[in-house]
Image: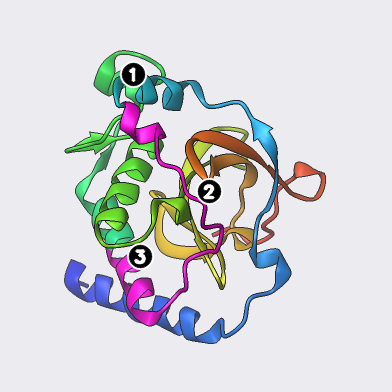
Amino acid sequence: MSRGVLCAAIILGALFSFAAKASAASDDFMRIGGLTSQPIGHYELCKRLPLECATRSADSAPLTLTRATWERLVAINASVNERIKPLTDKEIYGKEEYWAYPTLFGDCEDYVLLKRRELAQAGIPLSDLLITVVRKRDGEGHAVLTVRTDRGDFVLDNLADEIKIWSETSYSYLKRQAANHSGRWVSIEAPSNLLVGSVEK
């Protein structure tokens, strides 16, 4: 199957999923706690690029998810996943943790930064595009992009082209950027802070 056909199939499947979610359940939305520590990589990114952490928003309403917006999310998620090849910060920069916008190679948070920028350029508010720190089942840390919408919090992941509601993934959610301030982080409350998803590929 060609990449074009595969992408078309992903979009059609995603649109079917979108249509099926006519209304959102309460567990489709993350429960946010109080302010928490900023990841060191993000802190250092903010020092290098202060504007990254200067966005403030008084509008707390999530994005209205339309079919056109959903198509944009799916297309950009798949595009970045295809264009950027995975390498660790150690392999690229010679250090354990370095957040940056990737051109050819990157690790999980680099994918997130690029998706966030491209979606913002496509018209989605930064207050609805939130860098999120999770833990995988094997205990390894990971970063994904959370998109806040009126139909739930969706996750864009460099490990999969399929976009899922956060509660349908296999991750343990730890913290994410605050919606009202791009330089602050808030905790995510999950039952016992354990894995919230029960289905794994």
Q: Amino acid at mark 2?
A: Ala
Q: Residue at x 35, y 65 (%)?
A: 73
- Magenta region: 50-75
Q: Amino acid at mark 3?
A: Leu
- 58 relative position to 7: left or right: right
Q: Residues within 10 Å of mark 1 (few under 14, many from 20)?
A: few
Q: Quadrant of the C terminus?
A: bottom right
Which residue in the protein does label 2 denote? 179
Q: Residues within 10 Å of mark 2 (few under 14, many from 20)?
A: many
Question: Between tags 3 and 1, which lies in front?
Answer: 3
Sooner in the amino-acid sequence: mark 3 or mark 1: 3
What distance separates the C-alpha of mark 2 from that of mark 3? 18 Å
The numbered disc on residue 90 is: 1
Residue 57 lies within the magenta run: yes
Name above or below for residue 177 compared with residue 25: above
Viewer-nearest residue: 65 or 9? 65
- 101 relative position to 62: left or right: left
Contact (CB < 8 A) between labels 3 and 1?
no
Q: Residue at x 65, y 55 (%)?
A: 30
Which residue in the protein does label 3 denote? 73
